[in-house]
Image: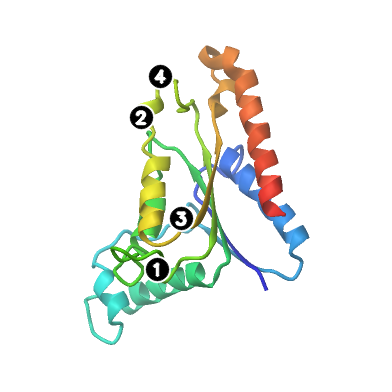
Amino acid sequence: MSSLLHIDASIRHEGSTSRQLTSYFVTRWRQNHPDGGYVYRDLAAEPIPHLTHPVREYLLDPSRDHGQTDEEKALVHTVASEVADADTILLGVPMYNYTIPSHVKAWIDLLVSPAHMVLPGADSGPLSGKSVIVVTARGGSYAPGTPREGQDHQEPYLRDVLKAIGLADNLTFVNAELTLAATVPALAELKPLGEKSLATAQETLRKLAA
């Protein structure tokens, strides 16, 4: 049975492009997988606390006391299990100040551990073999050839960190750009490009959901 882990991160619940797109994917995925499992986590509504103790030692040897509280241990186990049990992982990640929201980083920090890392020379790790779809929403454009091309610290970081823990075997980025063109007068002339980017993202997600 297929299983989908759906994660949203936008602090906006109304008018969020990343939430709109992940919802679009989930609706079609569940239609195409009526018996599939589904787990949802909203990192903005229920933020994961930032680390107070490293998780790497705990994940390698949970039987020992490494300073975590019982609540922290339970959270680490739950987050890691959600990822391990999913066949498909859908991440809705808006761009904030050229990079990812801090609460997405907090989620990632629970996963980046020697227990999950792809070892040097190895082709896979414990979390490998999943389909991972990252839906991003950006107010401007960071496409090749644009003035802000080199200021994208969102997708390159996510590619690197997901690869490090074996989640890049089947990794797809779906970027909706120029989301501010519809509301910012200075970007008004770019509105058609923003609409095209959104439509392309939806079509890509429709195909991926199949």
Q: Are marks 1 and 4 in contact (CB under 8 Å)?
A: no
Amino acid of disc 1: Gly
- C-alpha distance separating marks 1 and 4: 37 Å
Residue tagged 3 = 168
Of callouts 2 and 3, the N-terminal one: 2
For numbered disc 4, what is the local secondary structure?
A: loop
Of callouts 3 and 1, the N-terminal one: 1
Q: Nearer the viewer, mark 1 or mark 2?
A: 1
For numbered disc 3, what is the local secondary structure?
A: loop
Residue tagged 2 = 151
Amino acid of disc 2: Gln
Residue tagged 4 = 147
Position of 134 relative to 146 (above/below): below
Of callouts 3 and 4, the N-terminal one: 4
Position of 147 relative to 205 (above/below): above
Quadrant of the drawing holding the N terminus: bottom right
Residue tagged 1 = 125
